[in-house]
Image: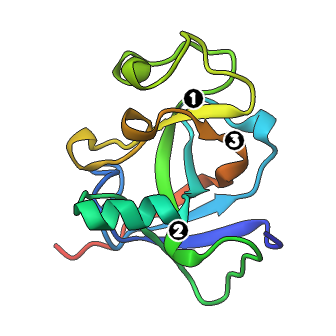
Amino acid sequence: MRKRLISVKISGVSMLPTFHPGDRVLARRVPQSRIAAGDIVVLASQPRTLAQLQAEARPYEIVSWEPHVTADYVRKDSWVIKRVAAVPGELVPPQVRSRVQGEVVPQGSFVALGDNPVNSVDSRHHGYLPLGAILGKVISGRPCREY
């Protein structure tokens, strides 16, 4: 990814109540060492996984990209937004333990969860995610809701 900042528009419900469909967020590319539990991140999902989820009609958070943002190696329809629940060296959260081996997150991996567990496909389904999948850390959000 060439740009340091990513402007994205939320289009799903997995991060409710934090973000709603139509909200916009700004994410900054940061070193993996600066990612911590509690951060909200934009990450690349495996296109194969997205296709499987579509086939199963499971809800998941798709983040659409803005036309002025380019990424060299990630398709726009494979971006997701989640909250980091644990990083390497931290204990695996209880809700993920049945999907992973070990009690501590291994190097190069992290655990991500949506804020709306009923409507989020995340580490509860896929286990550990690679740190390299993180495209950016959300640094600001702007509601774009109609009341």
Q: In this view of the protein, which residue sits in the foreground, 21 or 109?
A: 109
Q: In this view of the protein, which residue sits in the foreground, 10 or 132?
A: 132
Q: Earlier in the sequence, mark 1 or mark 3?
A: 1
Q: Amino acid at mark 2?
A: Ser
Q: 51 left or right of 108? A: left
**Label 1 vs label 3: CA separation?**
12 Å
Q: Amino acid at mark 1?
A: Ala
Q: Earlier in the sequence, mark 1 or mark 2?
A: 1
Q: Which residue is identified by label 3?
A: 131
Compared with 39, 10 (above or below) is below
Q: Residue furthest left?
A: 147
The quadrant in which the C terminus is found is bottom left
Q: Position of residue 82 (x, y in %)?
A: 47, 47
The structure's colour scheme is: rainbow
**Label 1 vs label 2: CA separation?**
22 Å
Q: Which residue is identified by label 2?
A: 78
Q: 24 left or right of 55? A: right
Measuring 37% from the left and 19% from the top, which residue is drawn there? 98
Q: Which residue is identified by label 1?
A: 37
Measuring 28% from the left and 51% from the top, which residue is drawn there? 16
Q: Secondary structure at mark 2?
A: helix
Q: Secondary structure at mark 1?
A: loop
The quadrant in which the N terminus is found is bottom right
Residue 50: image quadrant is: bottom left
